[in-house]
Image (cartoon, rainbow, N blue to C red):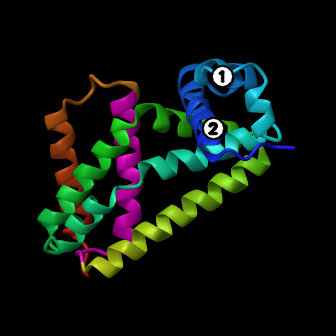
Amino acid sequence: MARSNPERRAALVDAAIEVLAREGARGLTFRAVDTEAAVPPGTASNYFANRDDLLTQAGARVYERLQPDEATIERQRAASPDLATYTVLMKELVGRVSGFRTGYLALLELRLEATRRPELRQVLTERIRADVEANVAYHEASGLPGDATAVKLLILAFNWLIVEQLTLPDVFSEEERDALIAAAVDRIVGGTPG
């Protein structure tokens, strides 16, 4: 029977994220998670039914940790709905995701693992689809320029920009990254009737 201490479970899932980012999916074992979390051997196996459960919860936890705080959301809502605001929002988003390097690398590992695990693929597909839909809904409610297709194109473009930043950080400087974000918003959103 799985244990239910929420703080311990969160610490174990956070440890799993670190292991995934460092060792890859093959390195994610209960023992590795116990070691990373600095808990007694056997602790992780008391909290998760199996490795798939741990993989799934790690994916969900990354998205949870990537959510902006309430102050950021309020500031974004109070800003004027124009292209300049959109550019600032996208720079903040790319910065927030890039700032959680191990989380994003863990997500990449989970995506690769999902190609071999149908249950994980289903969970990730549902989660990512819900995230895209939430981004589109937020965008539409905000009054920002552009449409749902523009939002989806930016998600796709910035995901790869983040991969570049995290795996080959010397390809683009921070200034180049910011210029690319501004250009993407201008060309994708600015060129969209809406």
Q: Any magenta on residue 194?
A: no
Residue 29's spot in the image, x, y percent? 73, 24
Residue 148's spot in the image, x, y percent? 39, 73
Residue 121's spot in the image, x, y percent? 70, 50
As shown in the figure, which amino acid type bears the numbered disc 1?
Answer: Val
For mark 2, does the 10 Å Cα neighbourhood hold few (<14), some (14 to 19), or many (20 or more) residues?
A: some
Q: Which residue lies at the image location 71% right of the left edge and 39% below the top edge? A: 54
Q: Which residue lies at the image location 33% right of the left edge and 73% below the top edge? A: 139
Q: Which residue is mark 2?
A: 8
Task: Please identify the quarter of the rendering in which residue 146 is found.
Answer: bottom left
- Marks 1 and 2 in Cβ contact (< 8 Å): yes
Q: Is residue 115 visible?
A: no
Q: Which residues are magenta?
A: 144-166
Task: Please identify the quarter of the rendering in which residue 43 is found.
Answer: top right
Q: Nearer the viewer, residue 180 or 169?
A: 169
Q: Is residue 190 left or right of residue 44?
A: left
Q: In which quadrant will I find the N terminus?
A: top right
Q: Any magenta on residue 156?
A: yes
Q: Nearer the viewer, residue 172 or 57?
A: 57
As shown in the figure, which amino acid type bears the numbered disc 2?
Answer: Arg
